[in-house]
Image (cartoon, rainbow, N blue to C red):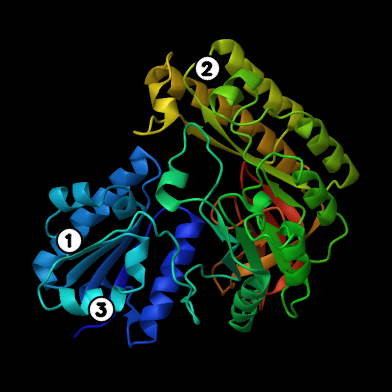
Amino acid sequence: MNKEIFLVSLGCSKNLVDSQNVLGNLSEHGFSLQTDETKAGIFMINTCGFIGPAREEGYAHIQDAIAWKQQYGGIIVVLGCMPQKDAKQLEIKFPDIDIISGFSGYVQLLESITTAQQGKKIRTVDTNQYAVPEAKNPTILTGGASAYLKLAEGCSKSCAFCTIPTIRGKQVSSDINTLVSQAKHLVNKGIKEIILIAQDPITYGRDLNDNINILDAINALEKIDNLDWLRLHYLFPEKMVKPIIQRMHGSEKLLPYVDIPLQHGHPEILKLMNRPPLGDIPEFLIEARQQNPDLILRTTFIVGFPGETEEHFQSLLNLVDKIRFDRVGVFGYSPEVGTPAEKLPNQVSEDIIQKRCNILMKRAAEISNELNANKVNTEQLIIIDKPSNNELSAIGRTMGQSPDVDGVTYVEGEDLETGDIIVADIIGHDDFNLYAEF
């Protein structure tokens, strides 16, 4: 039996953590990761089913896997959100897939692979089970000096555009002792930065009935020796954001990095999205940056939500100009079957959505460029993800650059290794990246 796995992990960082746990659990039984698909016996795809383009990407990789199977004769394993959401459609569309498994099937994945290698098809989806088994020794896939730590599974919010609660279920938080244990394992593997993720970290612990919250988890994680940086992602804009941001000020480990997906700036559109009004959150963010000039503000917006008028869109542009985010992710609205937003009147045309996306992205890039320019001729702390050699600069990130979603910092300097945290001079910039000398 060829136990080498070629993995394609799609979608968000939470999905990547699932992939790491799957590989970690299988590695205890002799399986290993193989980066050359021609040498693998298993072609595994962990899918994202959040929006249409993500599913199309998944379909393309499944087609690649089918071509691989026809040539090399291994088995195809498709996991994650797409099977959880619609396993039957996958089976009809791609009958050559050997294993189609939602989250409940991860527990018996070893048995399923053994059965599939004997020529039998496996289909495992239980819509009442969402949690992915945690591995004692997860296979770290991030590369560089950082890794993700998942605080909770699922989401108990009910945003009108989102399918996550139906795919992943309601929020289930990990207890703090488990988080500390997982974090220590990552640090022992050489990880210097841990990025805390969940669909809704703000509400971490509310389902545990232990009177704990996200600040308690941060306090416990900050005590871990040899962990240098903690970074938070996906802060839902509610009142709990304020003490978290205040906690960042003066902390030695919790980075001054606020990833807060506002999704829109107009209260009428937010109401249609089934999200709360922003209230005084914009003013608080501006004041927080004034108090801590190192604070980085990142957000995402959905453009072209049903009912969005030119007036609503202009309100969104005004919000971006007012707060001046360091980073902005822009997504054109995409209707998802089964969501309340799919049935709303006044759907916006694709042409208008694309036009508004372009306008917003251009304005956001201009602001990002201006803010990056302000960093030139300053000293910045930089963590090295990729070491330098005789021909190439080292690649690192400042405290304001999160892996994959933000730019990087190219560092000219000698003897820089992965995990080094240095102070370097910023000598240049572009819209998204910085350039430094050490």
Please rate how many residues cluster around mark 3, counting C-alpha atoms within 10 Å: few if below 14, some from 14 to 19, many from 20: few
Is residue 215 or residue 434 the one in the foreground?
A: 215
> Residue 156: which numbered mark, if any?
none
- Give the residue at the far front of this rendering: 209
Spatial CA span between label 3 and label 2 = 50 Å
**Which is closer to the viewer, label 1 or label 3?**
3
- Say which amino acid is labelled 3: Glu
Examine the rendering and report whether any part of residue 316 can be seen.
Answer: yes
Q: Secondary structure at mark 2?
A: loop
- Please name the residue shown 43% across and 19% down the image: 344
Is residue 66 rendered to the left or right of residue 277?
A: left
Which residue in the protein does label 3 denote?
111
Name the residue that disc number 1 marks.
Answer: 97
Instruction: Specify whether 235 is left or right of 308.
Output: right
Residue at 61 percent across and 18 percent down: it is: 268
Q: Residues within 10 Å of mark 2 (few under 14, many from 20)?
A: some
**Residue 308 tag number:** 2
Give 362 or 346, whichever is nearer the viewer: 346
Residues at circles 2 and 1 in contact by the CB criterion of under 8 Å? no
